[in-house]
Every structure is written in structure tokens, then in C-alpha cells.
Amino acid sequence: MNTYRLLISCPDAHGLVAKVSQFIFEHNGNIKEAHHHLDAQNKRFFMRIEIESNPTHLLDDFKQAFTQLAKQYQMNWQMNDANQRKRILIMGSKSSHCVADLLHRGHENELEGNIIGILSNHNKLSKIASWYEVDFKQVAIEKATKTADMAKMMNTVDSFNPDVIVLARYMQIIPKSMCEKYQGKIINIHHSFLPSFVGANPYQRAADRGVKLIGATCHYITNELDEGPIIEQDVLRVDHSDSAAEMQKMGQDIEKITLAKGLQYHLEDRVLTCNNKTVVFR
Amino acid sequence: MNTYRLLISCPDAHGLVAKVSQFIFEHNGNIKEAHHHLDAQNKRFFMRIEIESNPTHLLDDFKQAFTQLAKQYQMNWQMNDANQRKRILIMGSKSSHCVADLLHRGHENELEGNIIGILSNHNKLSKIASWYEVDFKQVAIEKATKTADMAKMMNTVDSFNPDVIVLARYMQIIPKSMCEKYQGKIINIHHSFLPSFVGANPYQRAADRGVKLIGATCHYITNELDEGPIIEQDVLRVDHSDSAAEMQKMGQDIEKITLAKGLQYHLEDRVLTCNNKTVVFR
Amino acid sequence: MNTYRLLISCPDAHGLVAKVSQFIFEHNGNIKEAHHHLDAQNKRFFMRIEIESNPTHLLDDFKQAFTQLAKQYQMNWQMNDANQRKRILIMGSKSSHCVADLLHRGHENELEGNIIGILSNHNKLSKIASWYEVDFKQVAIEKATKTADMAKMMNTVDSFNPDVIVLARYMQIIPKSMCEKYQGKIINIHHSFLPSFVGANPYQRAADRGVKLIGATCHYITNELDEGPIIEQDVLRVDHSDSAAEMQKMGQDIEKITLAKGLQYHLEDRVLTCNNKTVVFR
Amino acid sequence: MNTYRLLISCPDAHGLVAKVSQFIFEHNGNIKEAHHHLDAQNKRFFMRIEIESNPTHLLDDFKQAFTQLAKQYQMNWQMNDANQRKRILIMGSKSSHCVADLLHRGHENELEGNIIGILSNHNKLSKIASWYEVDFKQVAIEKATKTADMAKMMNTVDSFNPDVIVLARYMQIIPKSMCEKYQGKIINIHHSFLPSFVGANPYQRAADRGVKLIGATCHYITNELDEGPIIEQDVLRVDHSDSAAEMQKMGQDIEKITLAKGLQYHLEDRVLTCNNKTVVFR
């Protein structure tokens, strides 16, 4: 029994659900889970259907046949085999809380994907990578040689052939060309409740502003810093007695959990984007 | 343009979604919103579909025709016209926070239903009922005359001909016969995070146990006290400095909001029950 | 037995707590509750002490004597008699959810203060004010006559002689002179998680940005729009299926509760300000 | 500059704060942080004072002198040097999420204590212990030899000479004699929102009851199973689509964070107990 995930986004049309459901039924698929969303403002329809199917040859057959229907309704679509686990590349820097948490989840087989490597501009994460027997590459980024360093970093990224890149507190701004090449495939954790405190030092700025909750935001990277589609957010309560340093320490827990949640949604093909927003079918 | 809500619960079967979607399409319905759930343990399938339709005669036609399909798949089903707003009877006692909150929501047209009356064993709520121009009936419940009083109360309830009965801190145990007569139609707010602190004085018991969060639970009433299917729950943080009396005061906010949420889900036909659990399609 | 609340803010100094505690002890006061906070960055010390005292003459005596100590340590301080309930003026517009909620709390004696009036630029709230037997004044604010209207509004505010002014979705920008006159005495509820979405239409902008949590912020008004010291904040979860209109409706619950909490902290003299931040001693 | 933490619990008495503060002042201590709590029901007073002091000899002096004052007011008290980090023994079984999380926090120097060893009835955690260079001991617990096994386990515990024992999903019931020997020093994480679902299989029972929030509880162990004083609790939202297995997976995040929080409060001497409740001075 195989599981496939069909993701569709298209202009709204009468009878869409019926057409797609009927199609799946006729191709020996059984709908295990289905989610729909109509974006009333943009008149766009979104679907995610988990299909269970016995015949191992369903995928190609299905895909070929579905192309017709997709054309008719101007669908953006993809269909993924749940058995083909995504290849995850983690990019980190010095902070280890998110990286350690992801590695442990990977090790315990809790992620719907395989962590294939860690790329960092510092050496600090190499030890933990070796513990978990994950390939570690260091590409230092120096001010003086930034352009060349970034090029080397991007080559290294490409060499991993990743399906998804996780910026686990990488702390460097990703070059435009890489943003474009891996559009919708780079997931970042920002240590604030966006759109509050875009950019550097969000905890210090949260402390300075005197907010009563701090947050973390998991989002796709775009060319605009911290402006990409938000996948998941969470907050925790702080008060006047918490300094910026303490907020940073406390915030690590929601950073790691929010990143893990957002990544898992992506790995399970639960996230579609529409302009600068996400539809997350939980 | 009318909106109908089709609720289905039936044994899981291949092609169900396709069949139902196709049926709606062929009867000139447009699916505005659809939710599915497969209870894997009980092999039961649940659906809620919001259908938009132009011809005003769809409802009868549709219902008649659908009966066939429903029989074939052994469906429990109902189809409600969103224009036929449910008649809400509120039962209260002395506490007014939930009642005032519901009356205000009703007054501002935020509820998908009409509050048709308030029934209380005390007189305290009569003033606020009159402000909002809602019918108020008092049926005192005295220890010595309990059986007769309860019979009178039930007659009064019946006289309102309610679609849904809201126990807004009514504080009396509902007789078995009434539980059965209005099965799935009586919604209670219990002032604890069930199954903790079933029964009386939950705030005092929460304080005595030293819990760090207190809660409220909105659930359907059954014959078993505080054991009915849970619709919605919420909690808030307390600490050692909060006495039972303070918890009771603080808890009023989650009581009123949790009750309003649970009621609204019911009014929008978003709740299906399965054994002693609910499926809430938000 | 009377209760007094002593609030102190001063430069940090060795032995402060001992000095103040000893002073209270020697003046027949009993410390019921005490909170301290050292702002390490600004080297300022904050205290709130609830004092219980039998002799009814303690207050004057105490205040006079304390002035000496206060001078020595360069204290900003105040001492309030808990029996002298603050006079609350509510300013509203058309939305009634916060106003109704506050009126009900006042009516049930849950606020540590007395609601003495409602001032609005529209007439919509007059009915609910009359229900709760609270003085209602309307001062319309028209574009063409704004300066004069605002002057009239401010005269009306003054005529109430309020201790605290609550902007319960008043929707007009408060003139600078009023901000200054009532500094630290005007409490606003903003319908976003500040500093996100300062200004108008925060729910629409939250929906446009695709955030996964929406919020409400209770803060003191200053000359800078939505930049005053934050007293309390809260959030609730939304997703792609919630439109801006639905967010607005859902958000009303956290608006009213966050405002009521922040106001109550103020009424109980639990809030001190330091630059643009608050210390809230819960 | 040394930091000491003075914890006091005693019958309420007039002038207590003044006496203690004055004492600290006279012994060259500076109060960095102070928390008080009056348990009105039991008429007991609780204090936690963080004292900064220059002279390295303050501790003994102070302790000796304070004994007098303590006797006078019938105080239970302790004074801990923040530099003397507590020795933490972790007891685990097969689940690794809590253990890995604590080890990582220890490694990053985020805990106010030193993890000195891991004791488990299985071998599964030995690898991660070796990564973090923490002593690992396995004492298998077999049904047939339980009494002897438990004795061996307790000997092994003693051999670590721990200040605090963390049951990180240890899954065995701790013998009465060990509960008594280490009273107030054994911290457990229970995978439910206590008092709901005391005992085994809480996630399955939560799923069966259809609750809308699941929780985790960090508490001190007593002879009564899952009845000890609660230090910290947290919850997360679930719905009908989450099976017991999924709840278990989701719940790991609040288990590990709630345990880490509760442990940290204990390590920072922020927790006092009163009957079966805790006072947590955050």
C-alpha cells in the first residue's frame, strides 16, 4: 500500500472537488485525508489529498492521466510519493539548540525526511554532526572574501543536492541567486514574532520595547529579508524581570519547536503558498 | 444564493468523497467548504460540506434524492439550511458572566442563532434579560419539592421549543429524561479542564491540588455527570499566589469564551459526535 | 483594617529593602504582599508593597514621615489607599464588545474602581450605558470641525474628573495636550500584537501578511501613536481559512480580556513605568 | 562577588520582612532579588532572597548568626551558595527525547547544575550518554527479580551522591524507601495534565476521552503515584484528527520543555513546598 500526496492550486471552478475525487476513484486511489481551501479574495482553490493505492504502478499512470485534467483547470500541482523521503540540508552557525533538536528528531525517525548534511560557517557544530553520523562541511564566510565565500557556500549546497534547506540560525543573508534557485525550498527560523523585529537582534529590541510575549517564526526565504511566507509561529510569555539575554535563552525552546513543526509540515507536503502567504493543511 | 450544511457519518468505504461530491455537483450545488475525517480505530468516516446553491428549491429535491445514496452507504446524515437559525435557550442560575457575554454576542449578531429565552432557578438574571429584550422565566428548584420543580422546569424548557439548550452555569443536575430527550442538544460549560475535577467546587479542588493551569470545558450533556463529549477546552496560567476565589474570578474569562466558541461550532453545524467524542470541523 | 499600596521607583542603593521594611514596621504597618525589581541596565529599583494597618490615621502620618526617607533615596513614590477607588472614564466609538465587558465587570464589582461615565463620538453606546446606569456623553468628532470638537471632547473629559481614562476602541487619535495632561492615566487597547501593525486596520494587515497568531495590546497612551508602554498582551491562533473579517471577530475576545486585565493591574496599582516600559507586579 | 539564595518558610508574623532584610543589610549582604508569599489559608509565610555579597566569608558567619533569628520565628530555612552547583542524576528508560534535551542543555551550560550520570533499566541511552561524556549505568529491572533489582538500582543511585534525581520518563515506580530518602529531591515528568490521567497510558486515555488539549506535568515524587507537588505544567492543542500515537509524538515537546523548566526552577532554588503544593518564585 503506497501513499501519495496530491497538491493542487488553481482558479476556483464549479465541480472541482467532484472532478478530482472522481478521477482518483477511477484510478484505484482511496482518499485517506483531504483538505480544501478557497481563497475568496484571490478566487483561488487549494487542495491536498492523501491517496492510498495498492498497485505500485499508480504513480506514473496517474500523473500522466492527471496532466489532462490539470491543464483544463489551469492547475499548479504536484504529486509526491510519501516513500520518497526528502533530503534535508541543515545550515547553521554557532548556536546549536535547533540543530541538536533536529538531529535528535532525525535520529529517532520522527522527521518525514533524511538529514543528509550540515553546512556551517563555523566549526562548532562538527562534533554533534559526527555524533549523529551526519556529513559536516564548513565554509567560512569572511568579510574580506565574502563574494568568493558565498559562491563556495552555494557550490557546497548544490553538491548536497538537497530537497529542502533548513536555516537553523545560520545568521548570514542568503544571496539572491540562491533564494531564486531554491524558491519555496529554504526554510528559516526567525527569532521574533514577525513582522515585529525584522532583522538583527530581535530579543534586544523586544526587551527594549517592553513586549509581554516573545516569539519565533518559521518561514520560507525570499529576496526580502524576513518577509517570506510564514509557515508557523509561536510565542511565550515574558515580563519585566526578563533581560534580553534571558529572553534569548527562553526563546530557544520556541525557536526549536516552531522550526521543527514548520519543517515537518513542509516534509509532509502540507504547505502551499499563495502570493506571500501559506496555506497549511494540518 | 443559499447555503446548506451537509453532515455525514458512516462506515468508511472506497470512493465516498467522489460519490458525494459528484452528487452535489449534479444537483447544482457548489462546494464552498469541505472537511473530512477518517476515524481509523472505528473505521468511520465523517464529512461536513458547505454547499452553495442558487435554485431555492434545491433543499427538498436534494434531500429526497440524497436519501438513496445515504441508505446505500449506511449514513447518519443531516442537511441544514444556514438561513434557518437555531433557537437557543439559555439556562442560568446566579452567575451572570456567561449569560451576559452570550446576550451581548446575540445582540451584536455574532451568533449563528437566536436567543429565545433565559430560564433560571433564581431571579438574578431577569434584569439583564429585560435589557436585551429576551424572554425570562424563573423556575425555582427547592430541595423539598425537587421532583415537582424539575418537572415544571422541563415543561418550561419544552414550551420554548428550543433547538439547543445552553447551560450557562446552571448548577443543577439535569434529569435523565431531559438528557435523553435533548440528546446532543444540551451544551454545558464546566469550570475545570475535564476530566480533572469532575463535579462540584473545581476551583477549590484545583487550588488544593496546586495545579499551574486552570481550565474550562464546553461539552454535550449526557446521563453521566461531566462525562459527555467535549467540544472545546481552554486553560489559563495560575500560580501559588492565586487563591481558589481568585481562580474562580480569573476562570470566568475562559468559561465565557470557551462556551461561546463551543456553542458557535454547534450553531454552525461543525460538530459531529462519535461514541463519546466529537469531531469539530473548524 | 485598611490596605495601602506603596509604589517606589528610585536609583538602586544598598539596604533599600531593609530601610523601607523597617520603616513600615515601625509605623505599625504589616506587609501583606511585596514585589521588587532591579532594572540592571538602568540601575533603578522598583518596589510595590501592600501594607495592612489598623490605626486609621496611619496614612497621613506615614506619608509625612516617609517623605524624608524618599528624599534621601531620590524616590519617585506614591501611596494609595485601597479604599479610595479610582474613577474610570470609558471612551468608546461604535464597537461595543470592550465597553459591554467592562460595564458588566463593573456591575459585578469585579473592578477595583468605579466606572463614572462613557464618552463617545457616536450614539450607539448610549443604550448599554443606560442599562448599567452609567452617565453617557456624546461628543461627535467631525472632519470639518475637528479642532473645536476635540476641544469640546477634552472639556467633557475634564468635567468627569477621571483618575483613569480607558480607550475602549475609541478610534480617534488623542490630542497631544490631553496625552500630556493625563500622562500615565490613559489606557488603550490596540487590536494587534504591537509593535506589529501599528496604526489602522491591523486585522487586514495581519491577514495580508499571513501571520499565524493575532494579538491585542493594552498600553498607556503617549504622543507617539501605539508606542506607549505596554501593560499586557495576548494572542490567539488563526490560519489560512480565517479572513480579515473573521480575525476581527475572533480578536474581540482577546481585546476585551487583555484590556480588562491591563486596566485591573492599573487599578490595583500594580504598574510602574520606566522609560517606555512597564514593570507589572502581579 | 558571591550570590546566595536564602529560602524561608515559617508561620506568618508581624515585621518578618523588616527583620530579615535588616539582618541581611547588617551582614553586608545586598538583596538582588526578593520574593514573598503569604499562604493566607495556612498562615504561613514564604521568602526567597538572592543575596550578593563581597566578603567570601559571609556564608558561615551569616548562617551561624541567622540560626538565632530562624529559631525565634520557627523558620524552615536553607541558604545555598549559587556557586555550588547541584549534582544531577538522570534516570531514563527507552525514550530519549527528555534525556537528549537535558544533556544538550547541560552541554551548553544552560542548567544551573551538573549532570553527573544517567541510570537506566535499558541500554538504549548509553550511546547518547557517551557522546556527552556523561557516566552511564544500566540496572535492568526484571519482573522475576524486581526486589533485588530495585535494591541494586537504589545502591547505584546512592553511589552517584546526587543532589537531585530527574525521572526523565523512567517508567518504573520508585520504591517507598527511596521516595522518603530523597524527599523533595526527585523530579518526575508525567505525560498528562495532572490530575487528569494519573498512571499508565495517559495519551491513549486522553484520546479515548476526546480532550482538546494534552499536557505534561513536572512534579516532585511522593509515595502516592502522580500525586506529588506540581512544579510546572503545560498543554498543547490537539483535535479529533490526532490519534493517541500522534498525541504521544506531539506531547514529547511539552514533556521535554516542562521538565527542563521545572528542573531549572529547582536548581535555582526557586521552589518551596507547602503540604502538597509548591510555591515557585519565578
Image: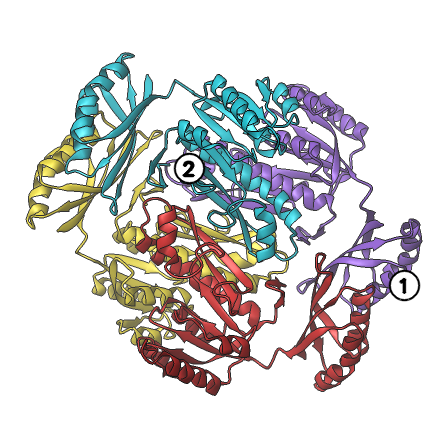
Chain colours: A purple, B red, C yellow, D cyan
Closer to us: C127 or B146: B146
On the rendered structure, is B167 left or right of D132? left
Answer few, some or many: residues within 10 Å of disc 1's Cα (few below 14, many 20 plus, some between 14 and 19). Answer: few
> Which residue is farthest front?
D144
On the rendered structure, is D217 left or right of C114? right
Closer to us: A89 or B208: B208
Q: Position of residue C23 (x, y in %)?
A: 12, 35
Q: Position of residue D177 (x, y in %)?
A: 43, 29
Q: Circle 1 marks a residue in which chain?
A: A
Q: Which residue is mark 2?
A: A208
Is B62 drawn above or below residue A78 in the view shown? below
Q: Position of residue A29 (x, y in %)?
A: 86, 58
Q: Secondary structure at mark 1?
A: helix
Whether residue C48 is visible, yes or no, is: no
Quarter that holds the C terminus of chain B: bottom right
Whether residue B198 is visible, yes or no, is: yes
Q: Name the kind of residue labelled 2 in the image.
A: Asp
Q: Position of residue C201 (x, y in %)?
A: 51, 59
Find residue B246 and report its image quarter. bottom left
Quarter that holds the N terminus of chain B: bottom right
Find residue B215 and report its image quarter. bottom left
Q: Circle 2 marks a residue in which chain?
A: A
Mark 2 vs 1, N-terminal side = 1
- Give me the disc on residue D242: none
Is B72 drawn above or below residue A238 in the view shown? below
Q: Name the kind of residue labelled 1 in the image.
A: Glu
Q: Secondary structure at mark 2?
A: helix
Is D128 drawn above or below residue B186 in the view shown? above
Q: Residue at x 33, y 22 (%)?
A: D80
- Give me the disc on residue A26: 1
Q: Residue at x 29, y 54 (%)?
A: C177
Closer to us: B282 or A179: B282
